[in-house]
Image (cartoon, rainbow, N blue to C red):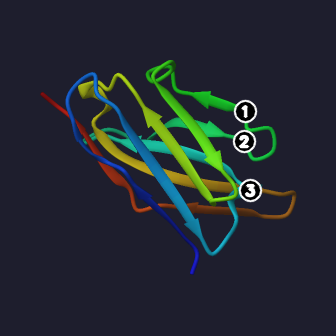
Amino acid sequence: QVQLVESGGGSVQPGGSLTLSCAASGFTISSYVMRWYRQAPGKERELVARITSVSGSTNYADSVKGRFTISRDNAKNTAFLLMNSLKPDDTAVYYCNAVRRTVDWVSEYWGQGTQVTVSS
């Protein structure tokens, strides 16, 4: 069964840290671009960070640049999002996404999401 399972969410005070994990099963992530999205109540889903499959280059939303770090461990078939200096505005459901595009087809998977709440 193909799935992505996020874990590591929870409640934290402002300035705190969390590390989210995204474990894949049923496929190997090494050929996939891995991305983290988030969706806050009443807002659209936004791309937070992405990491490419080959070079491992990364991109971040301006709102999290310098605070969040995306990484991947292809041997463990898992992607991560390290979140430091968390702010109340980071409160959202965080989703893991894996996508692979070829000339002929696109393969894409989503996780079920994990809640992150930043509050004092």
Question: What is the residue that sits farthest to the right in this orientation?
Answer: 103
Tell me if residue 112 can be seen: yes
- Marks 1 and 3, the one that precedes in the sequence: 3
Q: Quadrant of the C terminus?
A: top left
Q: Is residue 101 above or below residue 42?
A: below
**Residue 62's spot in the image, x, y percent?**
50, 19
Q: Is residue 84 above or below residue 99?
A: above
- Marks 2 and 1, the one that precedes in the sequence: 2
Q: Is residue 43 above or below residue 88?
A: below
Which is nearer the eye, 104 or 50? 50
| Left or right: residue 30 compared with residue 46 | right
Front tag of 2 and 3: 3
Query: What is the crowding at mark 2: few (fewer than 14 residues within 10 Å), some, or many (at least 20)?
Result: some
The kind of residue tagged 1 is Ser
Q: Which mark is residue 52?
A: 2
The residue drawn where x is 23% and y is 24% is: 14
Q: Is residue 84 above or below residue 37?
A: above
Q: CA distance from mark 2 to mark 1?
A: 5 Å
The residue drawn where x is 49% and y is 40% is: 81
The residue drawn where x is 27% and y is 36% is: 91
- Marks 2 and 3, the one that precedes in the sequence: 3
**Residue 70's spot in the image, x, y percent?**
56, 37
Circle 3 is placed at which residue position?
30
Quadrant of the image occupied by residue 109: bottom right
**Mark 2 in CB contact with mark 1 (< 8 angstroms):** yes
Regarding mark 1 in the picture, which secondary structure is present there?
A: loop
Regarding mark 2 in the picture, which secondary structure is present there?
A: loop
Tell me if residue 45 can be seen: no
The kind of residue tagged 3 is Ser
**Residue 53's spot in the image, x, y percent?**
75, 47
| Left or right: residue 2 compared with residue 8 | right
